[in-house]
Image (cartoon, grey):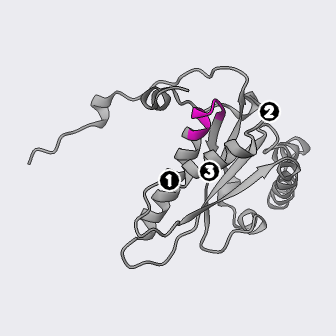
Amino acid sequence: MPDALDLLKTRRSHKTHEMAGPGPTAAELETILTVGSRVPDHGKLTPWRFIVFEGDARRRAGEIFSRLFQTKNPAATPDQIEKEAKRFLDAPLIVAVVSSPVAHPKAPQWEQELSAGASAMNIVHAAHALGFAANWLTGWISYDRDVLDALGLKPAEKIVGFIHIGRPTRTPEDRPRPALGDLVTRFDR
């Protein structure tokens, strides 16, 4: 297992079509989700939750996506509709991170959404630490209210992202990273 800094420096997003099974065991998934729940949480509100898609549930979710895509895009080609149906079939496991904000006088919704985002990143890091490939994706299915309703989200809930997790079939190339000099300033007033 890599040390913490090496782990953080070597994390890369893997394309979902470059993932294979088997996915995490039940114990590994519990570890991944436990790490996902250990994030800053002003007010101890737990303003996020997880939906796990594995096995045949991935295909059933794809049926929802393709049906809604076809309804919203009547000119869609059969290939486009089939692509939506197969959206969750590359990786053996997908975890949806749901932002579930709670009304609170001292914890603004924005902070709660950031906590949910931190949860998603922790899931990605935990998967990487266990030797899995991971990719945090959104896309139209993250923002479409009909999809959210079909997945059981409450009206105030949002999808932070779908974390696809599987075994890497190859090492992804690293992308160019920004120079710190372009990102860092020092306050000196």
Assess whether residue 62 is covered by the magenta stretch. no
Which residue has dot 3 on it? 33
Q: Position of residue 149 (x, y in %)?
A: 74, 69
Nearest to N terminus: mark 3 or mark 2: 2
Relative to residue 152, is residue 179 drawn left or right?
Answer: left
Q: Quadrant of residue 155?
A: bottom right
What's the residue type where badge 2 is placed? Answer: Gly
Range of magenta residues: 126-133
What's the residue type where badge 1 is placed? Answer: Arg
Q: Which mark is residue 85?
A: none
Q: Position of residue 158 (x, y in %)?
A: 61, 64
Which residue has dot 1 on it? 38
Residue 100 seen in this snapshot: yes
Relative to residue 61, is residue 38 drawn left or right?
Answer: left
Nearest to N terminus: mark 2 or mark 1: 2
Whether 101 is drawn above or below 36: the answer is: below
Q: Nearer the viewer, residue 116 or 127?
A: 127
What's the residue type where badge 3 is placed? Answer: Leu
Nearest to N terminus: mark 3 or mark 1: 3
Give the distance between the C-alpha atoms of the residues marked 3 and 2, in whole angstroms. Answer: 19 Å
Query: Does dot 3 land on a helix, a strand or a loop?
Result: helix
